[in-house]
Amino acid sequence: MRYAVLGTGIVGRTVAARLASLGHEVVIGTRDPEVTLARTEYAEWQSANPQVGLASFPDAARHGDVLVNATGGQVSVAALTEADAAHLDGKVLIDIANPLDFSHGFPPTLDPVDDDSLGELLQRTFPGLRVVKTLNTMNCQVMVEPARVPGEHNVFLSGEDADAKKSVRELLHSFGWPEESILDLGGIESARGTEMLLPVWLRLMGTLGHADFNFHIQGATAGD
Amino acid sequence: MRYAVLGTGIVGRTVAARLASLGHEVVIGTRDPEVTLARTEYAEWQSANPQVGLASFPDAARHGDVLVNATGGQVSVAALTEADAAHLDGKVLIDIANPLDFSHGFPPTLDPVDDDSLGELLQRTFPGLRVVKTLNTMNCQVMVEPARVPGEHNVFLSGEDADAKKSVRELLHSFGWPEESILDLGGIESARGTEMLLPVWLRLMGTLGHADFNFHIQGATAGD
């Protein structure tokens, strides 16, 4: 499968490397590839991961059969606007971002929050996309290697399109998520709930001193 | 111990009955006891639970060594204002409420949310109280009988006063919460995180069709 991962931060790079390791053709999308490659951190990562391409947002989106939104939540609409609607139509967008707002310092707040969500905003703004919100409730290392956290724990799905959710389930399986760990919360509106897990996640990270943890909904399945 | 449970809804009644069953002297506080007793549902519960008293907010607060806020989050400040600051000073308030706002229908939103919390609002408005936020992230049956949910799962603590949190831990133990299930997130500011769990909790209840579930932070302890 051909994937476009939008966003050059640690989340985008981690997911891109994992997808490439699974044999997919992966291109990372960014505003300006030359500027991105001028960042020492990115250049070093790129030389260690030569199988992952780097392209402008529209070129990356044209390449991808499936898109992954790993941009900062405050710039996701701008990134997808730049990607060009012609390259989005009918495609699945896996939205793993959160609308973190650092403008008031740390810890960040969320914008939108509570009566809207980034997942809904993207689905509403780009109706040609089939948005599936998932993986946004954990550290990026755990996203692609759930066994880093011992025991059972969950990943959530929100989205309007059943086929899109089915294909995302298959991708999650390939990352190592067992079928029984995937909790489908329903439509994209339920992304409000999962995005609002971030504030307690951040405080838990502070309390625990590490990020190798995840939410487990105890009592959700008969096997619990 | 003498407890005042503020609020006559299912949450207040469930916690009051459990406290009484543990041998505590419990009075439920309400705006107008006559009006409350005129409600068939309450009157029936009262005759089944004659050991629990019913009094006005100030009379209940005077009775209690420890107060439990089980009022609706939108009326909690009004209830505690009516209870009278003279009856609050130096006491522990266990805040198990959430600032659910049903004015726009279901599912409710939260008010305050994200850059403030009900826990902080109560601590700020009533500085004489020692507010401990806890138990607000689950169904009231699970609050007082955690074994309803099989396996390990967590209850969170937020608050400024170490002695108050210690006494709340002891109460949680008496409800059946093992020490290792209690996650102290720090100051009352961290109540923002736990109150923001409600939206996903509500959507999970809809998906699962029951309320006997709870959050477990997998990877939080070495034993996980």
Image (cartoon, coloured by chain):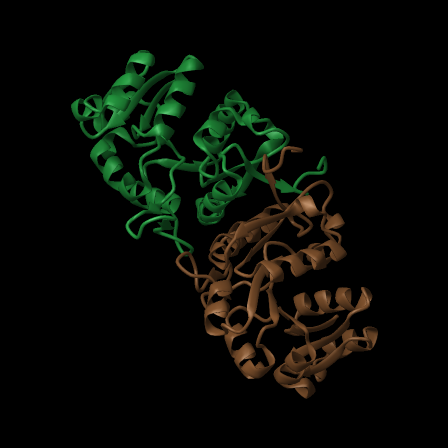
Chain colours: A green, B brown
Residue B126 at x, y percent in the picture: 50, 74
Residue B114 appears in the picture as rendered = yes
Q: Would you place residue B5 above or below residue A197 in this image? A: below
Q: Would you place residue B126 above or below residue A96 in this image? A: below
Return the residue found at the far front: B163
Residue B180: name its quadrant.
top right
The answer to whether residue A105 is left or right of residue B67 is left
Residue positioned 41% across, 56% down in the render: B114
Residue B1: name its quadrant.
bottom right
Nearer-the-camera pick, A159 or B161: B161
Residue B49 at x, y percent in the picture: 81, 73
The answer to whether residue B92 is left or right of residue A32 is right
Nearer-the-camera pick, A138 or B121: B121
Return the residue found at the far bottom: B34
Q: Would you place residue B17 above or below residue B156 in this image? A: below
Nearer-the-camera pick, A12 or A90: A12
Residue A67 appears in the picture as rendered = no
Residue B83: name its quadrant.
bottom right
Residue positioned 45% across, 65% down in the render: B104
Residue positioned 72% across, 38% down in the render: A222
